[in-house]
Image (tube, coloured by chain):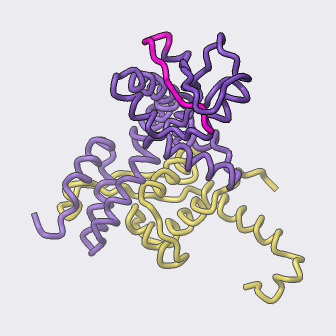
Chain colours: A yellow, B purple
């Protein structure tokens, strides 16, 4: 199994949310995390985490055109790279490996 | 500008902290327009500035500066306050004679209780720290605040070495001198040995 740097809880959620929505940018990613995971996301913290992920090559970003409803500010669209997808899968494998064989969790398994 | 425009001051702060981070600002404006509260906007801006912007560096630098300079300023400030003509009589009025007398009779010194707003606060904090077992060194703000205890210890008044503490009689007036103040002004404190 290739060694992949662990993702934090927030990083994993952001990656998954980015994969789930089309044309993912800050607002949509934060809303998706909030809607599916029930976790309120602070935009500054989300951008911090996304910057880290970009430095690690797990996401890429492109800046769109400015729009009036955003006060003339542009959107920054994020896309998960193949390395990012592999990282998410790896996180899932790790969690499932930890999950397996724990009697107390057997009934709760999805 | 509509009624639901983002707080102007918060927008200014955003502009100052993130002059080149339009997407973050745009996201906050867009989300705010969906009906988020001004409190929500402020929380987003402040946390973004704290965890992401240059303010993070500035706050860290400011914290370090306060940590280093704070106790020194506190000490100097307190000594200066004691040196003023009006400060000492006010302090004397607040002295606990019983505590001072016991100290004078046994050790030849009196740990003068400098009751004042600053010492009151630090005294309470000190007690909280003792009872909760919090390591104040891990909380810079707390550490700085409790460091203001330093002048309290600096204001120990000493009995004149020529006086034998063992022969003092109740009701006798003795003069105590503060070594810290002596270096700046000639300051002494006259107390009555308790019955």
As drawn, B188 above or below B112: above
Question: Which quadrant, please, contains the N terminus of chain A?
Answer: bottom right
In which quarter of the view is residue B18 placed?
top left
**In screen coordinates, is B113 left or right of B21?**
right
Can you give x and y, in whole percent of width and height, for residue A26 in the image? 40, 61
User: Above or below — where is B137 with respect to B5?
Assistant: above
**Closer to the camera in the image, B118 or B44:** B118
Count all numbered tags in the image, as a single digit.
0
Q: Is residue B50 left or right of residue B179?
A: left
Residue drawn at the location 51% of the way across and 28% of the way down:
B71
Q: Quadrant of residue A67?
A: bottom left
Q: Nearer the viewer, residue A74 or B17?
A: B17
The percent coordinates of residue B34 (x first, y second) are 27, 74
Classify B119 as above or below B7.
Answer: above
- The residue positioned 37% from the left and 59% from the top of the image is B44
Q: Is residue B138 magenta?
A: no
Front residue of this view, candidates B153 and A68: B153
Q: Nearer the viewer, residue B41 or B90?
A: B90
Is B184 inside the magenta-drawn segment?
yes
On the rendered image, what quadrant is the C terminus of chain A found in?
A: bottom right
- Residue A88: give x, y in percent of width and height: 65, 63
Q: Residue furthest bottom?
A: A107
In the image, the segment drawn in magenta is: B182-195
Residue A96 appears at what percent x and percent y?
78, 72
Q: Residue at x 47, y 78 (%)?
A: A35
Q: In the image, is A90 to the left or to the right of A9?
A: right
Place residue A73 in its image quadrant: bottom left
């Amino acid at each position: 199994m290739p060694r992949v740097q662990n993702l934090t809880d927030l990083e994993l959620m952001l990656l998954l949310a980015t994969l789930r929505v089309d044309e993912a940018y800050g607002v949509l990613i934060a809303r998706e995390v909030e809607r599916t995971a029930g976790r309120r996301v602070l935009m500054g913290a989300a951008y911090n985490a996304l910057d880290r992920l970009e430095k690690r090559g797990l996401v890429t970003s492109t800046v769109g055109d400015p729009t009036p409803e955003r006060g003339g500010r542009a959107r920054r669209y994020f896309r998960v790279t193949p390395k990012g997808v592999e990282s998410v899968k790896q996180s899932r494998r790790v969690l499932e490996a930890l999950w397996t064989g724990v009697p107390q969790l057997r009934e709760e398994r999805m | 500008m509509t009624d639901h425009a983002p707080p102007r001051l918060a927008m200014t702060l955003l502009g100052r902290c993130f002059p080149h981070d339009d997407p973050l600002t745009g996201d906050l404006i867009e989300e705010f327009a969906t009906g988020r509260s001004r409190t929500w906007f402020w929380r987003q801006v402040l946390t973004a500035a704290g965890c992401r912007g240059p303010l993070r560096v500035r706050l860290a630098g400011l914290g370090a500066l306060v940590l280093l300079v704070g106790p020194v300023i506190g000490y100097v400030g307190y000594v200066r306050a004691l040196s003023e003509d009006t400060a000492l009589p006010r302090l004397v009025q607040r002295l606990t004679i019983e505590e001072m007398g016991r100290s004078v009779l046994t050790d030849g010194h009196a740990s003068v209780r400098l009751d004042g707003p600053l010492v009151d606060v630090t005294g309470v904090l000190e007690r909280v720290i003792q009872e909760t077992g919090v390591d104040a060194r891990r909380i810079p703000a707390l550490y700085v605040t409790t460091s203001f205890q330093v002048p309290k210890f600096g204001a120990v008044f000493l009995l004149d070495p020529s006086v034998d503490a063992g022969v003092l009689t109740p009701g006798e007036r003795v003069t105590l001198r503060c070594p810290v103040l002596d270096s700046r002004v000639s300051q002494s404190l006259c107390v009555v040995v308790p019955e």
